[in-house]
Every structure is written in C-alpha cells, then in structure tokens.
Image: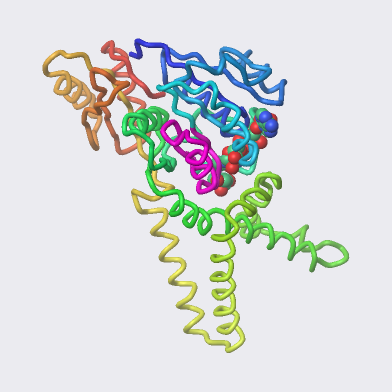
Amino acid sequence: MDKKIQKFAFVGLGLIGGSLAKGIKKNYQNTKIIAYDTNENDLKKALTDGVIDEAKETIDESFKGCDFIFLCAPVSVNNDYLKALIPYLEEKTLITDVGSVKGPIVELATTLGIGGSFIGGHPMTGSEKSGFESAKEHLFENAYYILTPTAQTPADKLERYLTLLTRIRALPKVMEASEHDFITGTISHLPHVVAASLVHLVEDTDTKEQLMKEMAAGGFKDITRIASSSPAMWEQICLLNQENILKVMTRYIEELEKIKDLVREADGPALFQFFEEAKTYRSDLIDDKKGALAKHYVIYCDLSDEAGGIASIATALASQRINLKNIGIVHNREFEEGVLRIEFYDHDSRTAAYQVLIEMGYEVYER
Ligand SMILES: NC(=O)C1=CN([C@@H]2O[C@H](COP(=O)(O)OP(=O)(O)OC[C@H]3O[C@@H](n4cnc5c(N)ncnc54)[C@H](O)[C@@H]3O)[C@@H](O)[C@H]2O)C=CC1
Ligand SMILES: O=C(O)C(=O)Cc1ccc(O)cc1
C-alpha cells in the first residue's frame, strides 16, 4: 500500500504518455496525475476517464512538487519542455522522456545542469497508432524499457524509476545512451526505413490496374505494418539518430548486395543457407525466454511483517494445484515492507492465483 501521495506530471498524453498515465493510475494507490497537452480534447477525455486528476493549460507553478515528470511529446518538443521545466524541478523530482533516441536529450540535460534530475527512458513497445485514444494500460507489460542515466543521476532516483517500471510490469534495462542509439538504430529505426521503402517500391512499380496493391499478401503486410506510423515521429528519429542509421543502412545495403549476388549466380545451396540461418535466428528470438516476445506471468502481493507470510501463500497456491515458477521478495523504497513477486508458467495460473490471494485478503497487483 502506498502511504504517501506521489505526484506525476505528463507533458504529452498521446499513445505513450497516455499508456504510462493509465498504467500508473492502475498500479499505484495514492497518486496525483497532472497533464499538459496541446490537444485539449484528449486532456478532457483523460480527465473524464479518471486517468488524470488535473488538466493543465500551460506549464506553470503547478508542475512544482512532482516525484516524476514524463516528457511524452515528439522528441524535439521534449527538448524544449526540458528547458521550460527547470524552474519547477525540486530535489526529489525525477524528470524523464520516452523518446526513441537518447544521446541528444541526455547530453542536453547534462549541458543544462540538470543531469542529477534526469534519466532518459525509452519503452521498446508501441504501435503504428498514435493519440490518447490508442493508449493502453497494459502497453508496457513484458516489454523492455530502456533507461539511460546521466553521469550525475543519483542511485536513489534510478532505483525509484526501476520500481515504477516493475509496477507497470515492464522489463527495465539500464545502458549508455550511445549504446541504446546504436541498438535501436539497428532493430527499430532501420526496419522502419526498410518498411517505408518497400511500400514505395510497390507503389512505384505497380501495374496500371494497381494489381500489386490489390494482391499484396500477408508477408508484405506483416513486414510493412510499421510503415503506417507517424511520419513526423520518424522524420525526427532519422534526423536525431542520423549517424547510427547511416552506418546500419550501409551495412544493410551490403547484405542486400550479398543476396543479390547469390540470386544472380543461381547459387542454390548458398541461398538455402541464407534463408535457413535467418529462420533459425528468428525462431530463437521468439523462443528465448529473455526475448522481447517472451511472456512473463507475474503478480505482486503486499506482505505484512508476519512471520511465515511466504510459506502460507505458497501453501495456499499449492493446495489449489497452482504451480509457481518463481517466488521472492522485492525490496525497495516504494514497497517499504517488501512486496512478494510471484511468477507462474501461464496466464491461467496467474489468474487463478490472483483470485486465491484476493480471497485470502491480500493486496494483489494484477488483473
Ligand atoms: N509510437 C510508438 O510506438 C513509440 C513512441 N515513442 C516515443 O514517444 C514519444 C511520443 O510518441 P507517441 O506517444 O507515439 O505520439 P502521439 O502522437 O501519440 O503523442 C504525442 C502527444 O504529444 C502532444 N504534443 C505534440 N506537440 C506538443 C506540444 N508542443 N506541447 C504539448 N504536447 C504536444 C500531442 O498532442 C500528442 O498527444 C515520441 O518521442 C516517440 O519517439 C517511444 C516508443 C514507442
Ligand atoms: O509498432 C511497432 O512494432 C514498433 O516498432 C513501435 C515502436 C516505435 C518506436 C519506438 O521507439 C519503439 C517502438
């Protein structure tokens, strides 16, 4: 149970900001959430839905006293707000962003002298949709959420952020901003460039009757889904992560040249090997339990100081034939008395365990 009210502020309440606000409202008991967005209709909707407590028309004094400030607008806009919010930052305030490129904003925070208040953030999940209406409280569940602290970020702020991510069921990963930008340049930014260029290729080479467009099959649709993403967002990402994207595009063009040679030479065995190696690696991506697509079936349960708390929970679940994969106490500042993290093998076990623990009178964080 959270005893103290925590204050959260959002600048930008679209797909990512809205999902974070929903996830926080759902998973924290005592919160005050304020938000500013240029889209007044979305703010009204968030207020009506109970996702936020106050809609703000400007950035002003009401942003004082925050525990967390999330910058969730387009990346270049976030940079402007980082500066605008400086007068309202307090000792305890942790200000972060959700942008897809991390180097520039981490550098900016340092240059502005607020490195001790800032941690870069990037949820490795989202969709081709945008806006508050597409926001989902579950968006971050089982998804990597990368944190890029500055050289001045204090350990307690990082720990507080990690706790928040655990509460919204994200999988936190801390790394250098430069490493982040190289990795996302390869696994996220290049694929968006490739998807969009494939769409252009088909549009430009289609027949007069547009038969390609009409007949485009599942494979083409799968690989180009992300070409429906916001053009403004991807324009900014390409401008900000230019160096990494150029590097990896050069490498990718070499890869295409290689397969082009194999096709030209009609080298069957080499072509087979090319596709087989890709298939094996792609399968690993899905099967690897640490992979981005892996599911974790976890619930969290408040434990009082009573002795034998874990044992009585484990016994109650076992008596209902619910198998546990993992069980252990998570200690941190927010879960002052410790919270029990229980992992299951599947969704049904998690749902059944949730019911059992609620009936036993425990405070449980899971649907
Ligand atoms: N879309 C995705 O899948 C992911 C996006 N991101 C990052 O999240 C950030 C936000 O992206 P989304 O939520 O997808 O976009 P979005 O378009 O859904 O939301 C952006 C919000 O910012 C507001 N906004 C725009 N200009 C503003 C301004 N000057 N002042 C105040 N509010 C303003 C918009 O009204 C909108 O509500 C971007 O920086 C993006 O790089 C990160 C991970 C995934
Ligand atoms: O829709 C998808 O699959 C995405 O790839 C979404 C996405 C877009 C931008 C990011 O920085 C992270 C994730």
| Image quarter of residue 299 | top left
| Image quarter of residue 168 | top left
* Picture quarter with the C terminus: top left
Q: Which residue lies furthest to the left in this view?
A: 307
Q: Which residue lies furthest to the right in this view?
A: 208
Rendered view: 175 above or below 163: below
Residue 112 picture location, percent across and down: 52, 37
Rendered view: 39 above or below 128: above
Residue under the point 56% across and 12% down: 53
| Image quarter of residue 210 | bottom right
Question: Residues in magenta?
Answer: 96-123
Q: Does the magenta stretch include residue 116?
A: yes
Residue 68 picture location, percent across and down: 46, 24
Q: Is residue 159 magenta?
A: no
Residue under the point 68% across and 50% down: 235
Residue 152 picture location, percent across and down: 38, 38
Count all numbered tags in the image, as a single digit: 0
Rendered view: 299 above or below 121: above
Residue under the point 61% across and 55% down: 192
Q: Is residue 17 visible?
A: yes
Rendered view: 341 above or below 120: above
Residue 18 picture location, percent across and down: 58, 27
* Picture quarter with the N terminus: top left
* Left or right: 27 as drawn, with respect to 102: left
> Between 155 and 100, which is closer to the camera in this rendering?
155
Residue under the point 61% across and 31% down: 81
* Left or right: 73 as drawn, with respect to 351: right
Q: Is residue 126 visible?
A: no
> Between 228 and 333, which is closer to the camera in this rendering?
333
